Image (tube, helix red, strand yellow):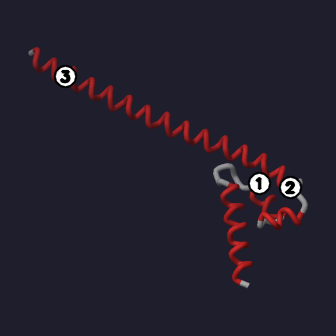
Amino acid sequence: MSVAYGHHEHARTGYRASRVGWIGKLARGLRRALEAYSERRINRAAFDTMLELDDRMLNDIGVSRHDVRWASNLPLSVNAAMELEQIARARKHSQYKL
């Protein structure tokens, strides 16, 4: 009987360990999502600063005022800074083709 009890205790310990592992993964995932959300909010604030630049400076960066406004209105689930960077790269690439 003690062998069965010992086996049962081992099974419960394994269950707790897997449960703790699952909770840890969930917590890490939530932390990463919150960090990404926070970073995107900070990036959105940077768009306000970009809109204060004159059109010539924005053009030097490779974006237009319209591009910055468009990116700043994207949902926070989208990394607007990356979207704006892709626009700038595409514009730069198309300029070199001419």
Badge 2, how many Cα within 10 Å: few under 14, some, many 20+?
A: some
Mark 1 neighbour density, 10 Å: few (under 14) some (14–19) many (20 or more): many
Residue identified by numbered label 2: 51
Name the one closer to the observer, 6 or 50.
50
Q: CA distance from mark 1 to mark 3?
A: 57 Å
> How much space separates mark 3 and mark 2, taking CA atoms?
65 Å
Residue, x 68% and y 72% (percent of image)?
A: 90
x, y percent for residue 38: 67, 41
Tell me whether the residue at label 1 lies in contact with that at label 2, contact meaning CB atoms closer than 8 angstroms: yes
The answer to whether residue 90 is left or right of residue 52 is: left
N-terminal label among 3 and 2: 3
Q: Quadrant of the N terminus?
A: top left
Of callouts 1 and 3, the N-terminal one: 3
Residue identified by numbered label 1: 72
Q: Earlier in the sequence, mark 1 or mark 2?
A: 2
Q: Position of residue 20 (x, y in %)?
A: 38, 29
